[in-house]
């Protein structure tokens, strides 16, 4: 009898009953419903029964360290002896020994290797993951829509690795983010027999109507999908190998769930952050700072983590960053409507541009200082209207965080935070108020080891940074 470390919810128990002994299975669970716990409990049950001795987890760059730092310590029982290793692209002699130890067949601990999906576009990543899967193994692909493109190098690598693992799981909120064609690679990873098509092109022929079209300018021709067909049959093929979990059906979930997605700073951001941090420390040593001056320094560092910075002349300088890409990945995983809060106008405009390009001009509305009064009312109406195409509410907490109702959303994303605790609390309550029938998931985008991370921690601990920080504390913050 498997003893859980954390008691599962009823929907998690139901999912485990259906999938625990299956060689291949898909868990299609909305964010915030605990699909990671289901997968880890499944792996631990198989380990206890002697079916596997190692687990390879492949997850997006923004979430793979959450498995190591939070999910595995929280959900893997203490009575299971385990060795856990995360992927690092810099293979030092010491790390080489760790990679050797994690795959040692004479070590009877449960061996867990966590990699980011991007690493499987590299020769090193492919090499070490294949070495690890030798033995009785299980492989989990978290947020499996990251392998929906059958032409991508990482998709091809993961499909190749699937043959090495006896047990395979995919986890995602929705397997179809753009079209039914998204399903092929995900199902092929689980088991090519599920769909019964030997190639993506055979799959496309079966479920899509394709014509030959001329590219813009008439320079070349390409294959264009104009509609889909046989989708009911496709659903019947996938259904026995998957379990669907929607937040609205999980009556035992907590009212609020908080999580984060880590954003790795680019080299350009690291350089700018280091220089700005040194400058702030110089100012700290030179004079006694007021809270206003301290917040100015924090804001400059915070802006860099978001991907921009103000020059001395007042111009905004763009910095290469990964934050917007991570947001778009989250939106691809999210079903239903979502609120996106951003602290800076520069970010709101960038988010608007990206969503418009990906989802179309009627898929969003914006709500910030420059938004006209009549447009604000229209934004709220369009967003709250279930029959409307408007899926994304983009705003800042200074303008939109008070007095309005946005209960159409059960997902709230903080692209960047304001320092004011009251604005954080008020903005959280735009979705979590009378009229909300679903649990609400709050996602903070955070760059680890920066002021960005400390701001979120302070706000979660109900600390009003704008009122309480002093000059003497600045060095601890940055």
Image: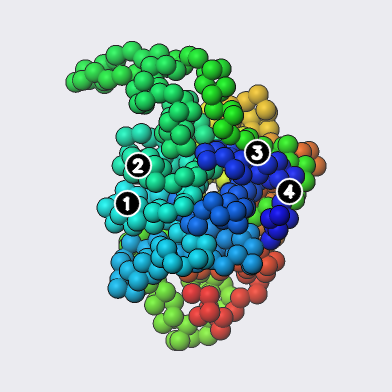
Is 400 situated above or below 417? above
* Residue depth check, mark 3 versus mark 1: number of the one nearer the observer: 3
Where's the N terminus, which quadrant? bottom right
Mark toward the start of the polypeptide (3 vs 2): 3
Secondary structure type for disc 1: helix
Mark toward the start of the polypeptide (2 vs 1): 1
**Residue indicated by mark 3:** 18
How far separated are the C-alphas under marks 2 and 1?
10 Å
Is 182 situated above or below 68? above
- In the rendered image, residue 149, in percent from the top left (x then y), is placed at 38, 35
**Residue indicated by mark 4:** 9
As drawn, is 18 to the left or to the right of 293? right
Q: Is residue 161 visible?
A: yes
Q: Quadrant of residue 410?
A: top right
Picture disc at residue 126: 1
**Residue indicated by mark 2:** 160
The local crowd at label 2, few if under 14, some if 14 to 19, many if 20 or more residues have their Cα within 10 Å, is: some
Quick check: marks 2 and 1 in contact, CB under 8 Å? yes
As drawn, is 461 to the left or to the right of 143? right
Which sits in the foreground, 28 or 61? 28
- In the rendered image, residue 157, in percent from the top left (x then y), is placed at 33, 44
Secondary structure type for disc 2: helix
Which sits in the foreground, 301 or 18? 18
Secondary structure type for disc 3: helix
Q: Residue at x 59, y 28 (%)?
A: 239
How far separated are the C-alphas under marks 4 and 2?
34 Å
The local crowd at label 1, few if under 14, some if 14 to 19, many if 20 or more residues have their Cα within 10 Å, is: some
Secondary structure type for disc 4: loop
- In the rendered image, residue 102, in percent from the top left (x then y), is placed at 42, 65
């Amino acid at each position: 009898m498997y003893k859980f470390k954390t008691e599962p919810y009823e929907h998690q128990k139901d999912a485990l009953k259906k999938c625990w002994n299956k060689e291949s299975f898909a868990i299609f669970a909305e964010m915030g419903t605990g699909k990671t716990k289901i997968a880890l409990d499944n792996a631990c049950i198989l380990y206890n029964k002697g079916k596997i001795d190692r687990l390879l987890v492949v997850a997006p760059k923004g979430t793979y360290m959450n498995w190591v730092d939070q999910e595995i310590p929280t959900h893997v029982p203490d009575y299971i002896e385990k060795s856990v290793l995360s992927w690092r692209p810099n293979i030092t002699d010491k790390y080489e020994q760790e990679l050797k130890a994690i795959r040692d067949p004479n070590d009877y601990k449960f061996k867990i290797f966590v990699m980011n999906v991007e690493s499987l576009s590299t020769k090193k990543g492919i090499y070490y993951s294949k070495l690890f899967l030798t033995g009785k193994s299980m492989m989990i692909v978290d947020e499996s829509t990251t392998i929906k493109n059958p032409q991508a190098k990482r998709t091809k690598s993961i499909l190749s690795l699937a043959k090495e693992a006896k047990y395979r799981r995919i986890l995602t909120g929705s397997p179809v983010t753009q079209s039914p064609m998204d399903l092929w690679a995900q199902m092929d990873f689980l088991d090519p027999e599920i769909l019964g098509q030997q190639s993506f092109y055979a799959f496309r022929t079966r479920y899509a109507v394709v014509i030959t079209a001329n590219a813009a300018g008439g320079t070349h021709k390409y294959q264009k999908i104009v509609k889909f067909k046989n989708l009911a049959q496709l659903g019947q093929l996938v259904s026995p190998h998957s379990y669907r979990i929607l937040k609205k059906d999980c009556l035992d979930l907590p009212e609020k769930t908080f999580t984060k997605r880590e954003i790795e700073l680019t080299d350009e951001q690291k350089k700018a952050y280091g220089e700005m941090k040194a400058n702030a420390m110089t100012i700290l040593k030179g004079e006694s700072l007021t809270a206003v001056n301290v917040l100015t320094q924090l804001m400059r560092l915070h802006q860099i983590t978001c991907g921009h910075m103000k020059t001395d002349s007042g111009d905004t300088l763009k910095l290469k960053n990964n934050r917007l890409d991570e947001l778009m990945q989250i939106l691809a995983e999210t079903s239903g409507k979502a609120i996106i809060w951003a602290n800076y106008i520069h970010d709101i405009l960038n988010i608007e541009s990206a969503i418009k390009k990906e989802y179309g001009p009627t898929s969003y509305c914006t709500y910030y200082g420059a938004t006209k009064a009549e447009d604000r009312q229209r934004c709220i109406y369009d967003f709250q209207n279930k029959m409307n195409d408007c899926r994304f509410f983009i705003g800042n907490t200074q303008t939109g965080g008070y007095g309005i109702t946005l209960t159409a959303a059960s997902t709230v994303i903080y692209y960047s935070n304001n320092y004011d605790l009251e604005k954080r609390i008020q903005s959280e309550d735009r979705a979590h108020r009378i009229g909300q029938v679903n649990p609400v998931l709050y996602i903070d985008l955070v760059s680890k080891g920066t002021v960005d991370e400390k701001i979120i921690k302070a706000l979660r601990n109900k600390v009003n940074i704008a009122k309480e920080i002093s000059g003497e504390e600045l060095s601890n913050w940055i």
